[in-house]
Amino acid sequence: MGLIRTLTKKEVKEKVREWKKEGASIGLVPTMGYLHEGHASLIRKAVEQNDHVIVSDFVNPIQFGPKEDLATYPRDFEADCALVESLGADLIFHPSPEEMYEPDFCTHVNVDVLTKGLCGARRPVHFGGVCTVVSKLFHISEADRAYFGQKDAQQLAVVRRMARDLDMDIEIIGCPIIREEDGLAKSSRNTYLSPQERKAAPILHKALTRGQEMIENGEKDASKVKAKVSAIISSEPLARIDYVEIVDWNQLQPVETTDGPILCAVAVYFGSTRLIDNFIKED
């Protein structure tokens, strides 16, 4: 059987009902489309761990602010379908905004505390939109497991907390960052970079690698690690720092020392393109 393409929630639910009757496990990979190798790594993991895999392909309008790139966000559904089918997923769900949100839709899911800093401080509507659409996808798919990339580390932490706090019967699987050969984290937004900006962008990985080395070599002072990461990024004239932060990995709150699980996250502009990257120390 080839890849099932569907635009409707009803068709997804009917197929899920069939699979559930067979006692099959279901994996979900939520995406906004324009799939790249980072998404492919999530789909591969889902195929490996589940009997059936659903990939959602939906540019979610309610997670974009009024001045953000909803209209220009890259899309290529046919290429997405080809990739998803080649990786062995069973179904791609490509709804319209009208299918996902009724005209009088007025229910939103918000996670407090973890969304106040990092990207949440700069994008106040973003995580409410993410949590709302992800919770809907969890219900529609009835998935046993859902797969998210570490590149969007705050998103991963927020979704995990939402699932725990709301007793959602689903396992959240975080997957490693996939990088280009020069270290740049793969992202749909990399297509916005000019040739000069693209050449400059790997400074993020270089800076984070140096910060990680400092911690591995025994540096406990988070402010010193932040200062070094910031200095390396600032050495690139085309880079404009939005933030460099070190927070604890469980609550996403700022820390003074690098003891315990931490997230070191950066957001940096190259021209008008905002890129994020990070590393996580788990213990």
Image: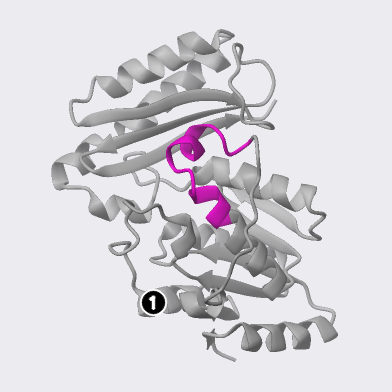
Q: Is residue 127 left or right of residue 77?
A: right
Residue 39 lies, with reference to residue 219, above or below; the image says below
Q: Which residue is at the front of the view, 32 or 115? A: 115
Foreground residue among 133 and 245: 133
Which residue is found at the position 65% from the left and 45% from the top?
A: 111
**Residue to which mark 1 is pinned:** 77
Task: Name the residue located 70 percent from the left edge and 25 percent from the top edge.
Answer: 283
Q: What type is the residue that disc 1 sits on? A: Phe
Q: Quadrant of residue 48?
A: bottom right
Picture coordinates of residue 114 (x, y %)? 62, 36
Magenta-colored span:
114-130
**Percent x, y for residue 200?**
22, 35
Q: Is residue 234 magenta?
A: no
Say above or below: 244 vs 188.
Answer: above
- Residue 45 visible in the shown view: no
Label 1 crowding class (10 Å Cα cut-off): few <14, some 14-19, many 20+?
some
